[in-house]
Image (cartoon, helix red, strand yellow):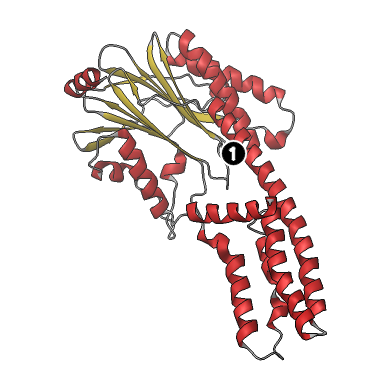
Amino acid sequence: MGDIGAFRTVFAKVRRRDPGLLSPVALTAVIGLLAVFTPQDVPFTQLLPAAPALAASVWSVGATLVLGAICVLPVVGYALAFSDASAPYTAGAIAAVTLAAAHASHLRQQREHTLAQVRAVADAAQEVLLRPVPDRIRDLDIATLYLAAAPQARIGGDFLAAADTPHGLRIILGDVRGKGLGAVGVSAALLGSFYEAAYESPDLGQIARRLDTALTRYNAAVTNEEFCERFATAVILELPPTGSLVSILSCGHPPPLLVRDGTTRVIEPAAPSPPVNLAALIDCDYHVERIHFVPGDLILLYTDGVTETRDPDGVFFPLADWAGQTATTSPTVLLRTLQKALVRHSDRNLDDDIACVAIRNAPQSQSQSVELAT
């Protein structure tokens, strides 16, 4: 009865998800019909072992065994009824393949279970490293986008975080040099330092110096050069509780975009600041820019995975022009549209991590309506 229950489970999954799960049944039916409606000297029944073999790739052990029994019993009955000398060999082949297929199905299910556990751990790691950013903080609408380039990966070398501190809302977005597990380790070190420094440091330059120290210590602790990433670029924003001045510190990172009244401005720093962990090497300090961020404005932070996305002809994605032509002022819709545009531009071949943060200063009327609704 347990095997029949497993067989019923297959059909329940078919109704909910993937009709392709019926392929073993379809193959069995096709071979059976050919065996019935073709001359007896054409032994189509010898193809029946293919059905349980196919079932092993998509079905459970019980369902695979049930299908094997369904295939072998008519052959045994035919052998007994018509004394066909070849039928017992066909039945034996079906039985042998069914047992092998059941074992293969068991191994596949074990691997799927292990993969599910690994994905759960990866999701938990992403929740720890990339803590969810609220959709709204005070009068600010916020949206984030994160795409890891590695196949099946949840996290990569890009990082982002937000902290609502007494100094104001502080947001960081950055990109670690390199990819793989080493880059993830550097991201974890930098994010841990940011979450601590964001509440304690009086200004953005102090936060950058704390990040610099954290990365220096991390590099000193990592002895494997293959996984030791030496620096990272980052952009740090501070949006104070009151006033319209926003502080921006770009540590060798692509400049943010300011979208205002349908026009896009690239916020280039007046003086360059070094990437994290390179200030001492190039003897350079950190310089903070301040711009007006009025109601209706939108700031877009992004990593170079966005601007370095290429089409099949090698043309880079024109982010500034694209942002200026996009009519929406919703951060969520903007990033959703940007993701589709990047996938389309790259012909579905994104080869670098991508992280974005969009922050919109909501007009006062909208802010009041949201407060009334809540």
Residue 22's x, y, as percent? 56, 63
The count of marks equals 1
Q: Is residue 181 visible?
A: yes
Q: Nearer the viewer, residue 136 or 295?
A: 136
What residue appears at the point 63 percent right and 77 percent down from the top-left corner? 32
Please indicate whether residue 372 sits to the left or right of residue 217 in the image: left
Residue 86's x, y, as percent? 81, 83
Above/below status of 295 relative to 177: above
Above/below status of 240 relative to 162: above
Q: Which residue is situated farthest in the front direction here?
A: 81
For mark 1, does the 10 Å Cα neighbourhood hold few (<14), some (14 to 19), or many (20 or more) residues? some
What residue appears at the point 54 percent right and 28 percent down from the top-left corner? 127
Q: Which residue is mark 1?
A: 178
What residue appears at the point 77 percent right and 56 percent down from the top-left corner? 103
What residue appears at the point 62 percent right and 66 percent down from the top-left corner? 24
Residue 53's x, y, as percent? 70, 65
Please indicate whether residue 6 sits to the left or right of residue 242 in the image: right
Residue 237 quadrant: top left
Above/below status of 374 relative to 338: above
Q: Nearer the viewer, residue 154 or 168?
A: 154
Question: Which quadrant would the C terminus be assigned to in this image?
Answer: top left
Q: Nearer the viewer, residue 141 or 33?
A: 33
Please indicate whether residue 244 sits to the left or right of residue 350 in the image: left
Residue 179 quadrant: top right
Please indicate whether residue 51 sits to the left or right of residue 153 in the image: right
Residue 114 quadrant: top right
Q: Is residue 49 visible?
A: no
Q: Amino acid at mark 1?
A: Gly
Residue 113's x, y, as percent? 67, 43
Above/below status of 96 relative to 354: below
Secondary structure category for the residue under label 1: loop
